[in-house]
Amino acid sequence: MFVSGEPNTPGTEYRCTRNAQACIDAGYDARVVVCAAVSFDDIAWADIAFFWRVEFSGHVSTIIDLCHRENVKTIFDADDIVFVPHYARINIIDGIRSIGATEERIERTFCEMRRTLAKCNFGSTTTAELATEMHAIHPVVHLLPNVYDHETLRSARLNLRLRKEPGRPAELLDIVRIGYATGSRTHQRDFKRASKALATILPHYPNVRLVLFREKDNQKPVLLMEEFPELSLIKDQIEWRDMVPLSELAEEFARFDISIAPLESDNVFCEAKSEVKYIEASLAGAASIVARTGPFLRSVRQDETGLFAETTEEWCSALTRLIEDPTLRTRLARNAYHDVLYHFGPAAQARRMKRAVMTTQSETSAAIAGELHFAEAARGRSPFLSFQKATHSFIMTSTARHALL
């Protein structure tokens, strides 16, 4: 059972719906339930309950108590550091400011998330950095990265083919689009890492467009544009697109020639964010420029599957290279597509989910799952874990470790 603490958000699709499908693909039954709607019948049906971004409350306490009484293993899942209260500071999480929240309110939310994590048997999350933070409370944390689903892959490849089909007007084929696909007003300082380079480079290339997004109903930009006065120099080169639901996002990525994913790589909150923007851009045939955060460094190879940029000078260099060299764009995008197709697809997630479930069943099955995990890491089949880092995603009990030996 996957319990969503934030229904009607894209995270429910990534962390509940797709992981539930991974369970089904691994041979188990699975269902997704909104936290407020969890009933005793749901608890009695389940063997394992994942709680994604569920804040603690009397209702949640009752659910977890009943799970433990019914011998249902409980796993807290998070895709951001939303369970460390002292990180709820504007100097760390700029989104607190840009969405109009307060440090006090976000700290309370993080406190309640942490209470849920502490009450659960295990943890699961998207990156090794997040797993490390969870280990402060639980020794067993499962690394289940964000992945794509079959429909996203189908839509991405279909729309890429449509964009490149013969017979399109020459003036459209000459346009190079640089896309920044953000879905919330929480990335002001992140985008600032690239904005000056964009304002510097684009005036030299009249055929280049910067694709940004706005709210469909009121046409208000998702980015707070007043914080980027430098972009006034290229306002005629900005192409505005309406925000779309997650089910249509692949179509937007397929319009990009270049996808950018700037982050504050010297920020503990941003350092833990997943590589999902790179995954979705790669499926849709866009070449990526990304920040030097841990997840990107493990999944992207410089000059093979993407480019890294941190300073304004590096962003200028990376943008110039990809704008001027369509062959490089194509090569990076093709290599990246082949990489993410295996590592971040439904089949790979089903294998991870199988191992996660095995660890909850017995010491012997936990030992077998651990052996499989370490063997895969040692073969280098995982782009987001080195063998040395493997313990970040799978720490077994001492009995299980002895069983391995």
Image: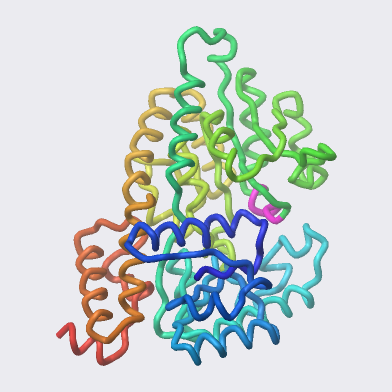
Name the residue: 70% across, 56% down.
Answer: 186
Dividing the picture into quarters, in which one does residue 79 lie? bottom right
144 or 68: nearer the viewer: 68
Nearer the observer, 51 or 100:
51
Q: From the viewer's side, name the closer residue of 273 and 112.
A: 112
Could you say where residue 223 lies in the image, as x and y percent from the top left? 74, 45
Dominant secondary structure (helix, strand or loop) of the stretch shown in magenta: helix
**Residue 190 colored in magenta in the image:** yes
Can you name the residue that lies furthest to the front here? 41
**Residue 117, horizontal then vertical, whole percent:** 55, 82
176 inside magenta stretch: no
Is 375 placed left or right of 122 in the picture?
left
Kindly identify the residue that appears in the image at 68 percent across and 36 percent down: 212
Image x and y of residue 278, in percent = 48, 46
- Residue at figure coordinates x 26%, y 75% from the top left: 370
Which residue sits furthest right?
A: 218
Please determine whether, in this image, residue 184 is positioned above or below residue 59.
Answer: above
Instruction: Name the residue located 36 percent from the left edge and 81 percent from the top edge.
Output: 360
* Residue 75 vertical placement versus 222 (above, below): below
Is residue 303 visible in this depiction of the protein? Answer: no
Q: Nearer the viewer, residue 68 or 346?
A: 68
Query: What's drawn in magenta, residue-wise?
Result: 186-191
